[in-house]
Image (cartoon, rainbow, N blue to C red):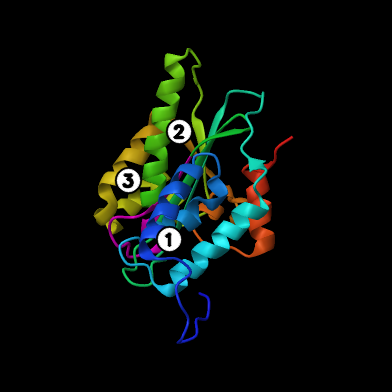
Amino acid sequence: MPVISSDATPCFTQTVYRQIIGSLQYLTLTRPDIAYAVNMLSQHMHNPEIHHTVLLKKLIRYIKGTIGFGLPITRSNLLLRTFSDADWASDPLTRKSTSGFCTFLGDTLVSWTVKKQPTVSRSSTESEYRALASATADTIWIKRLLADFRIVHNSPVDIFCDNTSTIALANNPVFHARSKHIEIDQSFVRDHIQMGTIRLMSISTVDQVADILTKPLATTRFQLLRSKLTIGQDG
């Protein structure tokens, strides 16, 4: 959070703030690297404080410095793979978690989501599981859409998660009695694992691409994950 002096003035009026955020929401359709920042700033459109306008100004400077960046469409295989992540209790006021997931078709990023979870999670495992359920639903929808174009996935779609407790919970029904508060999400994910629709895969936090969609990151880490999302200079 930037340090703001007591006599500081907002960088934008509330009206201009809303207009800029509205425009940036369209930009996230091709720039998932700013999706987290835009999502966070858009949560304060009703009454932006001074530090929100300062952060928005920094975001605009970043966009100006990467104006030539874009999301390429790469000729490659047509296999789906999804990365799912969550940042537990990330909202300092409501303590709600942030979900983030992204799906690749071959080497091309085709879908991504950043969203604050509607309810408070009582553990990191719960927040990760809620994100996983949302990622599973989105992946299944993309898989069915591709089937309409006669691109059929006979093998399970790999969904990568970096939370070992979440993976154990999805694969081991013994754990279910201790987590009845997320029973619907558990049943949904587990059913699709058993049907062979998806396959839940473990991934290290270092390699978790969806990390860029759930939290602010250090510059080096951000740039690394941005490149893994295939976002870069056009041409």
Return the x and y of residue 21 as percentages of the image width and height: 43, 54
Residue type indicated by callout 1: Leu
* Dot 1 alpha-carbon crowd within 10 angstroms: few under 14, some 14 to 19, many 20 or more: some
Q: Assess disc 2: are there few (<14), some (14-19) or many (≥20) residues with their C-alpha within 10 Å of its C-alpha.
A: many
Comparing 49 with 32, the one in front is 49
Image: magenta residue range: 112-128
* Rendered image: mark on residue 159: none
Foreground pick, 97 / 202: 97
Across and down, in percent, residue 160 comes to 53, 44
Question: Which residue is situated farthest in the bottom direction here?
Answer: 6
Q: Earlier in the sequence, mark 1 or mark 3?
A: 1
Residue highlighted by disc 1: 41
Vertical placement of residue 118 versus 10, above or below: above
Residue 7 visible? The answer is yes
Q: Is residue 136 magenta?
A: no
Q: Is residue 19 above or below residue 7?
A: above
Residue drawn at (46%, 67%), measured in percent from left and top? 53
* Residue at 45% from the left image edge and 87% from the top image edge: 6
- Image: 143 above or below 23: above
* Kind of element beneath mark 3: helix
Q: Circle 3 is placed at which residue position?
A: 186
Residue at image x 51%, y 42%?
102
Per the model, the C-alpha gap separating discs 3 and 2 is 14 Å
Upstream in sequence: badge 2 or badge 1: 1
Q: Position of residue 205 (x, y in %)?
A: 59, 56
Q: Amino acid at mark 3?
A: Gln
Q: How many marks?
A: 3
Say which residue appears at 45% left-offset and 77% top-offset: 9
The residue beneath circle 2 is 198
